[in-house]
């Protein structure tokens, strides 16, 4: 396209030079003189040269007109052509490599992925071209936040990978730019979140007056943790963060638990009832506190308000997530447990009978600290205790809705301490 406007210059310039006397006028475009012999005038013989001036003049006029209309340098056609043809601008004229069609594809991480800051991540993609072999292509990874991350040469199949561990926190658009030798490039991009753990809640100093609020029999223990019940009968307590709101979507929670201490005269160490971490999706603290105050004691663990744990004959409609640590098997009093074992259960919506996922943790009642992690990825819930995976399964139609986060616990005839400490939340980034 860019040479279209040059053609008239190239072909009319000699004619114009001829007309200006700069060149011998041998251009085939000029008319050749016609010669007539035999004309006689007064005995003199003369050659009459019939020059077709009209043809020459008209030809020159044409040449000049054409050149004026498409003057050397930039004319309107050239300017508009240059402006709209990005390839002409980006590709230096010196690059004479033929143009194929490059292609870029990012295969990992997936769009919307949440990556923990500082953790290594492998970027993977495919770089191909219609004309050039993969090895002739260059592949450049970049982030709109951190700039160029690295350059690699695709293997024979076009695979490109890059290991990075220095993505800064926040939202990123990752791009893979594949360039062929002609300079033509293709770009693929994907948006991800690089997130960081919240400041840990260590509960080493009193929580009174801070964002954590205690309810019922729960209290801050000067040992540096939260105690839901104390080792006494018929207690129900809760402590919730009434300021922060855990966002919906993928999330990771990390905390420590300790329970035990019950000892009968016969040496039995089977205590009760258990405790739970809950995330309650209500709009206001008033609604949260209504929920906390309504939740049942005993087997309802201070989080049950629905189903078998309905209170005052009314099953509360609540959107909530719970992970319970239950050390007492209930059998319709009022709720049900799936096992006589101490167990961890994934529960929802204030229902203490429907164990969506559960796993036995028979060792839990030793009053030692046990680290617990809960990792929610889509509808998959993965839980570790003491660093060991105890469940990792999808729950059909499960969605983590976020909400206010807190703890609760209960005792009955049998008792135990119910302690929480060191809560951390892997904060989610809102991915574009
Ligand atoms: Ca602590
Ligand atoms: Ca129970
Ligand atoms: Ca249970």
Image (cartoon, helix red, strand yellow):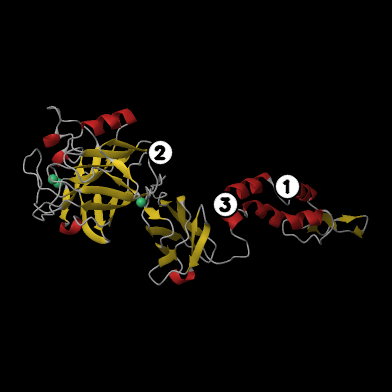
Residue 130 in view in this figure: no
Q: Which percent across, then down, holds residue 277?
A: 26, 45
Q: Are marks 3 and 1 in contact (CB under 8 Å)?
A: no
Q: Nearer the viewer, mark 3 or mark 2?
A: 2
- Residue named by callout 3: 86
Say which mark, if any, is on residue 108: none
Left or right: 23 in relation to 291: right
Of the two numbered discs 1 and 2 on the same chain, state the one appearing first in sequence.
1
Q: Number of numbered discs present?
A: 3
Q: Secondary structure at mark 1?
A: helix
Residue at image position (14%, 35%) is 309
Of the two numbered discs 3 and 1 on the same chain, state the one appearing first in sequence.
1
The relative height of residue 233 versus residue 110 in the rendered view (above or below) is above
The relative height of residue 1 versus residue 216 in the rendered view (above or below) is below
Given residues 132 and 303, the one toward you in this image is 303
Given residues 316 and 229, the one toward you in this image is 229
Say which mark, if any, is on residue 210: 2
Given residues 296 and 86, the one toward you in this image is 296
Residue 256 in view in this figure: yes
Q: Which percent across, then down, holds residue 232?
A: 19, 43
Left or right: 41 in relation to 95: right
Residue at image position (40%, 36%) is 209
Say which mark, if any, is on residue 62: 1
Q: Which percent across, then down, holds residue 40?
A: 87, 56
Q: Nearer the viewer, mark 1 or mark 2?
A: 2
Count residues near mark 2 (Cα–Cα under 10 Å), then give few for <14, some for 14-19, many for 20+: few
Mark pair 3, 2: CA separation? 59 Å
Given residues 232 and 280, the one toward you in this image is 232
């Amino acid at each position: 396209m860019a040479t279209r406007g040059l053609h008239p210059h190239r072909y009319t310039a000699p004619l114009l030079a001829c007309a200006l006397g700069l060149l011998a006028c041998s251009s085939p475009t000029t008319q050749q003189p016609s010669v007539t012999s035999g004309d006689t005038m007064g005995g003199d013989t003369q050659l009459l040269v019939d020059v077709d001036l009209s043809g020459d003049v008209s030809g020159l006029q044409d040449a000049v007109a054409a050149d004026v209309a498409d003057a050397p340098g930039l004319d309107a056609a050239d300017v508009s052509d240059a402006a709209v043809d990005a390839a002409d601008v980006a590709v230096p004229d010196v690059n004479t490599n033929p143009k194929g069609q490059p292609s870029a594809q990012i295969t990992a991480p997936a769009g919307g992925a949440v990556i923990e800051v500082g953790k290594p991540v492998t970027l993977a993609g495919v770089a191909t071209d219609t004309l050039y072999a993969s090895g002739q292509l260059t592949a450049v990874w970049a982030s709109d936040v951190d700039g160029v991350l690295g350059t690699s040469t695709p293997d024979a199949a076009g695979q490109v990978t890059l290991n990075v561990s220095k993505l800064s926190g926040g939202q990123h658009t990752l791009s893979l730019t594949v360039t062929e030798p002609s300079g033509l490039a293709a770009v693929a991009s994907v948006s991800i979140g690089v997130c960081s753990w919240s400041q840990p809640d260590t509960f080493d100093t009193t929580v009174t007056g801070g964002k954590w609020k205690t309810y019922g029999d729960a209290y801050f223990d000067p040992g540096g943790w939260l105690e839901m019940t104390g080792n006494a009968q018929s207690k129900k307590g809760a402590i919730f963060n009434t300021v922060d709101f855990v966002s919906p979507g993928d999330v990771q929670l990390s905390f420590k638990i300790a329970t035990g201490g019950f000892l009968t005269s016969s040496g039995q160490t089977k205590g009760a009832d258990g405790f739970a971490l809950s995330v309650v999706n209500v709009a206001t603290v008033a609604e949260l506190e209504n929920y906390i105050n309504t939740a049942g004691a005993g087997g309802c663990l201070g989080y049950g308000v629905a189903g078998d744990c309905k209170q005052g004959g009314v099953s509360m409609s609540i959107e909530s997530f719970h992970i319970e640590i239950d050390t007492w098997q209930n059998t319709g009093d009022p709720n049900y447990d799936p096992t006589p074992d101490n167990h961890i259960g994934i529960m929802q919506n204030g229902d203490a009978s429907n164990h969506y996922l559960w796993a036995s943790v028979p060792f839990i009642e030793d009053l030692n600290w046990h680290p617990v992690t809960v990792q929610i990825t889509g509808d998959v819930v993965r839980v570790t205790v003491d660093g060991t995976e105890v469940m990792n399964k999808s729950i059909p139609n499960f969605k983590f809705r976020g909400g206010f986060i807190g703890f609760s616990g209960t005792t009955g005839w049998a008792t135990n301490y119910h302690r929480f400490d060191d809560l951390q939340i892997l904060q989610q980034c809102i991915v574009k």
